[in-house]
Image (cartoon, rainbow, N blue to C red):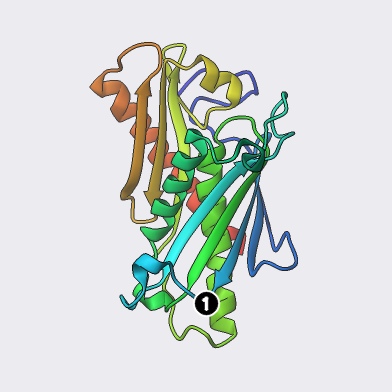
Amino acid sequence: MTGTRRDGRAADDLRPVRITRGYTEFAPGSVLYECGRTRVLCTATVEEAVPEFLEGRGTGWVTAEYGMLPSSTPGRKRRASSRGRPDGREVEIQRILGRALRAVTDLPALGLRTIWIDVDVLQADGGTRTAGVTGAWIALADAVARLRADGKLAGDPLRGQVAAVSVGVVGGTPMLDLAYNEDAGAEVDLNVVMTEAGDFVEIQGTGEKRAFTPAELEAMLALARKGCMELLSLQRESR
């Protein structure tokens, strides 16, 4: 793909990714995940209990919460606690995170426990939900590794990896991993969650300014697959 973007990337390039595992001291799984100027802190904690709706079913649970720090955007964002509840976007992203992680987790093999994944956006420059998914899997994997090292799990409940990336059509060109300035002006916006097997967990697509063609959809999905495969490789290399 041709064309140079404002930050110098080609249309099919990811932003630079940096992964810092073990970023906090107390969580059994934690990672600072950076893609370009977007930075998210993903932490995993273990609770030796399951939600009421799963009691007696012999299965564990993986769930997530998502929030943006007040200074993560140019204008101060109010905390959910001061608003009384998470906003609709936060709830939507929490559900995406949970679905993505459960798609690659054998919940019965996890035992009667819950792993909570907290994704806190430290700085937002587009793609916070996809960065959250990619970083959250690393935090989950580290928490599972801790449980196994402590003798609390005999096997590995993780059935594979999962990662996510944004794609879109900007100025008529399909592009991978949109920064905020690109996302804000995109004609089409797509968020894609994929497993290492190349299967889709989630595809969220919207014609922001116009309808998009089947050919454009195919081009965006091809970019998403390329980007997710690269991110899955970076997850493995970060160990």
Residue at position x 51%, y 57% in the image: 137
Residue 174 image-quadrant placement: top left
Task: Count the labels in the image.
Answer: 1
Up/down of 119 relative to 176, above or below: below
Residue 215, how many percent across, how many down?
26, 22
Q: Crowdedness of circle 1 by 10 Å Cα count: few (<14), some, many (20+)?
A: few
Residue at position x 53%, y 28% in the image: 178
Residue 229, how many percent across, how many down?
44, 48
Residue 49: tell me if it is visible.
Answer: yes
Residue 94, how many percent across, how many down?
48, 46
Q: Amino acid at mark 1?
A: Glu
Q: Secondary structure at mark 1?
A: loop
Residue 96 relative to residue 5: left or right = left
Residue at position x 52%, y 17% in the image: 3
For disc 1, the marked residue is 48
Residue 42 image-quadrant placement: bottom right
| In the foreground, 119 or 149 | 119
Residue 196 relative to residue 6: left or right = left
Up/down of 204 relative to 66, above or below: above
Residue 235: tell me if it is visible.
Answer: no
Image quadrant holding the N terminus, namely top left
Image quadrant holding the C terminus, namely bottom right
Residue 217, how many percent across, how many down?
30, 26
